[in-house]
């Protein structure tokens, strides 16, 4: 790279750090989070809130810079917003949930925090991912500070337990995966991802791994047994039933339907005609593969969802071989998955009748826009981390170079549109904080790969699952 270019990129990073500083929210004089977007020219809607999922890259960056206070304050304050009682009103958030977002409100000079559990979100979507991300942030905080005592405080132990109880509760279904409504994660609008979406399963796996380390209780307690039982079942279920590569596609293509009982090969009764197998066979490189978006009764969503796949690599939910195959697929199908802005939230977009049925004719989620095949720069840090974990850092470098030529000039938009990510998202906010932090964190990870430890897990080993001591 030319010296002049390097200087420009240094300036871009400097600007990004300044913007991050400006995005910090203060509560009673203490920094407690970052706002979703800094653009003020439009109605704020809820973009002046601090979203739990949006705060993740901010938190990791602050931890990498030794700015522990803001992450600690965030964890303490969000924990206070977690309901600890089950109210007998179905319209109130359940025990253990962590809100999607919060903001500081002041009345008569008195500041307090207003939490949103989906009441302010469009379509009242449930933020299932928040409580999972919350445990993941707590784990990263403890790893970075080595202050296990922070997580051992009774209120934190209770917070983790309540989340675990919520996730491990007996339900109607008999899968190790979590059953959730549509729009329960980063994709916050209807997009045909109800059921068992990969993103939630990968975060669930990460949260179980983290909780197992953070809970102080002895190994014979019910909750720990519950976690230990669930982890291998969830892992094997995902590795077997979500995996798609040429070998698996061949098996699915020749599946027999209507099988009963334990000997059924096609356990979920998937009909090959329900998937675009001809296109998929052309798209899948010989050595590549990925985890499907969703698996349920007669349902196999073959869309590629980036967050779920990348997080599956980081948490070792995917096997080593599968992780390599996912990165290989990203490399081989670069124009579809990364193209001009890293990276697509999902691929391909749903179009025509499918678009109408799955989104409910949502004008924001038109094909190749927003959640429906748009490109989200925040995913850059996850791509970088996954590339590091699999030893494919050159892919991360390539993606970062693409992003840094555009992001600052385009004023850090929330998302991009089009099959190649060439258009700034139709309704994208500018100065979106997780666009800024996603870029900075990717850079930081490249400079110091040790930070990967804050967010990644080795293969789960039941005999060595132990707790706090080896954090
Ligand atoms: C959008 C995204 C959601 C994000 C929110 C705030 O609604 O879908 O994931 O948390 O914006 O940035």
Image (cartoon, grey):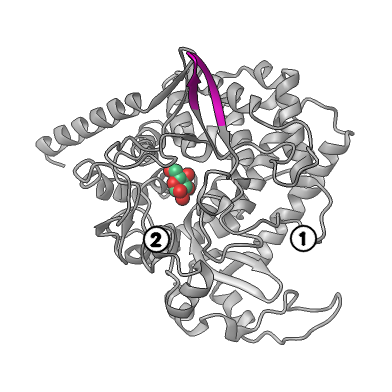
Q: Which residue is mark 1?
A: 175
Q: Which residue is at 83% across, 43% downward?
A: 226
- The C terminus lies in which quarter of the figure? top right
- Residue 122, image x and y in percent? 50, 51
Of residues 319 and 427, the one drawn nearer to the viewer in this rendering = 427
* Residue 284 in the image: above or below residue 314: below
Magenta segment includes 110: yes
Q: Which of 417 and 224 lies nearest the eye of the viewer?
A: 417
**Neighbour class for label 1 at 10 Å: few (<14), some, many (≥20)?**
few
Q: Residue furthest left?
A: 4
Tell me residue 372's x, y (percent): 43, 63
* The N terminus: image quadrant: top left
Front residue of this view, candidates 458 and 419: 419
Q: Is residue 250 shown in magenta?
A: no
Is 152 positioned to the left or the right of 310 in the image? right
Q: Is the C-beta of the residue carrying label 1 under 8 Å from the nearest atom of ligand 1?
A: no
Q: Quadrant of residue 10?
A: top left
**Are the residues at dot 2 and dot 1 in contact (C-beta closer than 8 Å)?**
no
- Observer-nearest residue: 225 or 137? 137
- Segment tinted magenta in the rendering: 104-114
Q: Which mark is residue 364?
A: 2
Residue 12 located left or right of residue 71: left
Name the chief secondary structure element in magenta: strand
Whether residue 391 is visible, yes or no, is no
For label 1, the SS is loop
């Amino acid at each position: 790279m030319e010296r002049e270019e390097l200087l420009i990129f240094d300036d871009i990073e400097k600007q990004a750090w300044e913007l991050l500083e400006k995005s910090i929210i203060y509560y009673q004089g203490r920094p407690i989070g970052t706002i979703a977007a800094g653009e003020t020219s439009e109605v704020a809607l809820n973009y002046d809130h601090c979203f739990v999922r949006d705060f993740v890259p901010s938190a990791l960056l602050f931890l990498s810079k030794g700015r522990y206070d803001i992450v600690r304050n965030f964890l303490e304050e969000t924990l206070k917003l977690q309901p600890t009682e089950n109210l007998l009103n179905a319209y109130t958030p359940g025990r253990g949930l962590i809100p999607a977002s919060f903001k500081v409100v002041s009345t008569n000079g008195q500041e307090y925090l207003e939490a949103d559990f989906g009441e302010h979100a469009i379509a009242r979507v449930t933020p299932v991912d928040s409580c999972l991300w919350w445990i993941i942030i707590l784990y990263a905080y403890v790893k970075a500070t080595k202050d296990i005592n922070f997580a051992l405080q009774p209120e934190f132990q209770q917070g983790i337990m309540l989340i675990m109880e919520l996730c491990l509760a007996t339900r109607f279904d008999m899968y190790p995966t979590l059953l959730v409504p549509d729009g329960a994660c980063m994709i916050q609008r209807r997009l045909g991802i109800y059921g068992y979406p990969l993103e939630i399963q990968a975060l669930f796996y990460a949260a179980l791994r983290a909780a197992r380390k953070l809970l102080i209780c002895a190994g014979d307690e019910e909750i720990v047994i519950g976690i230990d039982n669930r982890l291998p079942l969830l892992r094997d279920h995902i590795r077997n039933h979500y995996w798609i590569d040429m070998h698996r596609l061949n098996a699915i293509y020749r599946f027999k339907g209507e099988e009963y009982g334990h000997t059924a090969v096609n356990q979920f009764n998937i009909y090959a005609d329900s998937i675009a197998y001809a296109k998929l066979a052309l798209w899948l490189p010989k050595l590549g593969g990925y985890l499907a978006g969703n698996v349920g009764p007669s349902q196999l969503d073959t869309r590629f969802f980036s967050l779920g796949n990348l997080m599956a690599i980081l948490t070792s939910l995917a096997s080593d071989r599968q992780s390599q195959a996912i990165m290989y697929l990203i490399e081989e199908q670069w124009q579809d998955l990364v193209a001009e802005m890293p990276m697509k939230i999902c691929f391909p977009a749903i179009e025509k009748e499918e678009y109408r049925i799955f989104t409910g004719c949502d004008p924001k989620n038109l094909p190749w826009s927003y959640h429906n095949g748009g490109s989200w720069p925040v995913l850059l840090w996850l791509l970088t981390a996954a590339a590091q974990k699999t030893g494919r850092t050159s892919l991360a470098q390539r993606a970062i170079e693409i992003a840094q030529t555009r992001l600052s000039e385009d004023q850090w938009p929330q998302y991009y549109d089009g099959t190649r990510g060439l258009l700034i998202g139709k309704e994208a906010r500018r100065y979106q904080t997780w666009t800024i932090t996603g870029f900075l964190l990717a850079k930081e990870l490249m400079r110091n790969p040790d930070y990967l430890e804050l967010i990644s897990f080795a293969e789960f080993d039941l005999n060595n699952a132990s707790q706090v001591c080896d954090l």
